[in-house]
Image (cartoon, helix red, strand yellow):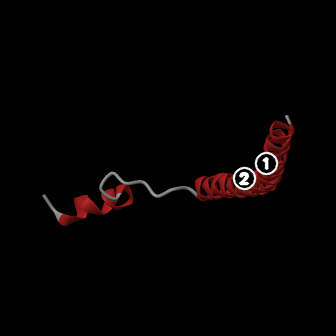
Amino acid sequence: MQFDDFSNQESAGWGITSPKSGDIVANALKKEKVLKEILSYQEDLRAMLAKVDTTQKEVDKLVSGNETLQMYIDNLTVQMAKRR
């Protein structure tokens, strides 16, 4: 066996094939598409979070208003009970 026999097998590279340029471009385009989708989803989540925060503030205002009204009703009830 001579070393010249191995010269033809160099292109095989121990069974590892190098990616073709078209594969690299296709993979890059797929990755770019996925990244754009991720960024879009992040923006959607930010918008939803802002809406949740706004809604939570409105709920807190309503709860506070309800507590104030309940205190007013309780005071009126006590005053009415004293008059009888």
Find residue 32 and name its label: none
Image spot of residue 58 (x, y percent): 83, 52
Nearer to the camera, 70 or 41: 70
Q: Secondary structure at mark 1?
A: helix
Q: Is residue 10 left or right of residue 17?
A: left
Furthest toward the left, the residue is: 1
Q: Secondary structure at mark 2?
A: helix
Image spot of residue 60 (x, y percent): 77, 53
Q: Which residue is mark 1?
A: 71
Image spot of residue 51 (x, y percent): 80, 52
Nearer to the camera, 41 or 81: 81
Find residue 45 and name its label: 2
Image quarter hosting the C terminus: top right
Q: What residue type is disc 2 on?
A: Leu
At horizontal 64% and vertical 59% (from top left) the residue drawn is 28
At horizontal 29% and vertical 56% (from top left) the residue drawn is 14
Image quarter hosting the N terminus: bottom left
